[in-house]
Image (cartoon, helix red, strand yellow):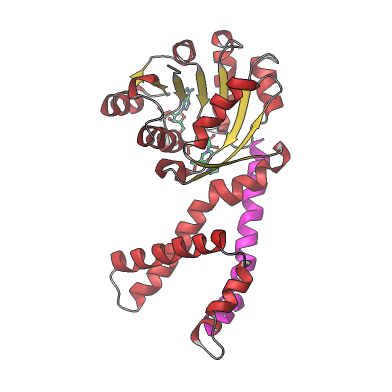
Amino acid sequence: MTKIGFIGVGGMAQAIIGGLLKARAFAPADIVVHSHQAAHYQPYAQRLGLTAVTSNADLVAASDLVVLAVTPNVAATVLTEIKPALTPQKTLISIVAGLTLAKMATLVGDQQPILRTLPNVNVEIGAGMTAVAANTELTGAARTTAEDVFNVLGSTTTLNEDQFGIFSALAGSSPAYIDFFIDSLSRAGVKYGLSKQQATQIAAQATLGSAQMVLKSDKIPFALIDQVASPGGSTVAGLLAMEEAGLMTAVVKGIDATVQRDHENA
Ligand SMILES: NC(=O)C1=CN([C@@H]2O[C@H](COP(=O)(O)OP(=O)(O)OC[C@H]3O[C@@H](n4cnc5c(N)ncnc54)[C@H](OP(=O)(O)O)[C@@H]3O)[C@@H](O)[C@H]2O)C=CC1
Ligand SMILES: O=C(O)[C@@H]1CCC=N1
């Protein structure tokens, strides 16, 4: 059986592992974990029945797929550390935002098969959106095996590396921005007397349905806006007030800052 190892078991690795277990894509014991602090990875591994090892090198030795799931500031150090344990029979999978295939190859060697990915947190419930880019060493069955890790967790798209920055903003970071929007809607509901729990449920279901409508309809979002906004009605009054407060400009400015920070991490 293919064994998958995670270097780092923070928020994103735990979302991927949770999604893989729910999809029964790997048996718990075939998921190997290690992170910086034993107090973090050992209880987590024990709780889920995963295989915990005591070093990054041991993790690479025990895994066919090695997922780099550390923050960008320590990625280079960790790649240098695991280089002696890597072989061309193993696939290195990075989820690190901003880290290019070329940079990784300089640290682990040109012969290493590598899949650069950028998943989002919704992989945890099988509703993820992940970008992938393979280097020239990753081909055939090995490439399929690596990409299938993310195919079982939602949608995937193959992307040129120069588009990973904007993808990271629109799919990787946006769950936080959409949660912010849902929370803003539900806070408005509280202002008008709904309980926070009921307002959040209502706002989240309306957001989910609207996203599904955009994906299923042949209309662009602006046409769907017109379908909701009745002449002389309440929606158009709300839309104009939101635009006066600069909603679209605020969103684009937020994405600009996200992309800029992603480039600084590269
Ligand atoms: N969060 C998200 O939605 C997304 C994140 N990403 C990328 O995923 C990566 C991880 O992000 P996130 O999970 O949010 O971050 P976290 O801070 O939650 O997790 C980072 C993990 O790295 C571990 N770590 C730190 N240093 C080492 C080391 N030397 N050796 C082994 N493990 C180490 C930490 O271990 P310990 O806890 O034991 O200290 C921790 O488990 C980032 O590169 C980010 O760009 C990509 C897409 C989406
Ligand atoms: O906040 C971050 O840096 C990462 C990248 C995409 C989502 N989270």
Give left or right: position of 179 versus 197. right
Query: Going by the image, does 94 lie left or right of 191?
Result: right
The residue depicted at 52 percent of the width and 31 percent of the height is: 148
In this view, 36 is above or below 157:
above
Which residue is more in the foreground, 162 or 247?
162
In this view of the protein, which residue sits in the foreground, 10 or 20?
A: 20
Q: Is residue 139 visible?
A: yes
Point out the stretch of residues depicted in magenta: 237-266
Q: Main secondary structure of the magenta part?
A: helix
Q: Is residue 119 magenta?
A: no
Quadrant into which the C terminus falls? top right
What residue is rendered at 68% in x and 19% in y?
Answer: 137
Provide residue 60's location: percent of width, then percent of height.
49, 14
Is residue 242 on the magenta stretch? yes
Rendering coords of residue 103 (x, y %): 69, 25
Numbered circles on residues, count: 0
In the rendered image of this protein, does residue 241 appear above or below residue 1?
Answer: below
Determine the residue positioned at 58% across, 10% down. Answer: 87
